[in-house]
Amino acid sequence: MKKILAILSLFCITLFSCNKQDDIAKFDFRVNEVKDFELDTYKEVVPIDVESLSGVAERVTLSISGLPSGLFSAEIENPTGTPDFSTFITFSSIGPGNPAITDYPIKITATSTSGLTKTYDMVVKYQY
């Protein structure tokens, strides 16, 4: 009887001390279609795809930073979703035109609910 209890105790300790979290892949994602473009008309629509790479998918929120004040604006149609999802960014000219094409670097940031953050660079060549 002692032998059975010892084996059963050892089995329970082994079973409950294993960390099952190690077997679960952590969530990872990427944002596709972020590329440079030329804004030479009043409005330009840029598609964006957010793809899950591993783990249990979490909500991802997209944001834009680095927009030049007074020249053009950008709005993400649906900035939050659970991968795989697609959305688009609408860039609109709001300022006076430039006789020469000027490059404006901006950043697209994607952040998951658990805090995984990825930043992507994009250059908008602006002449309107």
Image (cartoon, helix red, strand yellow):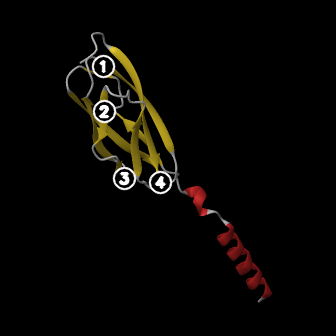
Q: CA distance from mark 4 to mark 3?
A: 10 Å
Q: Residues within 10 Å of mark 2 (few under 14, many from 20)?
A: some
Q: Residue furthest bottom?
A: 1
Q: Nearer the viewer, mark 1 or mark 4?
A: 1
Q: Percent position (x, y) of residue 71?
A: 31, 25
Q: CA distance from mark 3 to mark 1?
A: 32 Å
111 to the left or right of 95: right
Residue at numbered disc 1: 126
Q: Nearer the viewer, residue 104 or 2?
A: 104
Marks 4/2 in contact by CB < 8 Å: the verdict is: no
Q: Nearer the viewer, mark 4 or mark 2?
A: 2
Residue at numbered disc 2: 73
Residue at numbered disc 3: 82
| Quadrant into which the C terminus falls | top left
Residue at numbered disc 4: 113
Q: Earlier in the sequence, mark 1 or mark 2?
A: 2
Q: CA distance from mark 1 to mark 2?
A: 12 Å
Q: Nearer the viewer, residue 92 or 28?
A: 92
Q: Nearer the viewer, mark 3 or mark 2?
A: 2
Where residue 14 sits, quadrant-wise, is bottom right
- The amino acid marked with disc number 2 is Ser
Q: Residue furthest right?
A: 2
Q: Residues within 10 Å of mark 3 (few under 14, many from 20)?
A: some
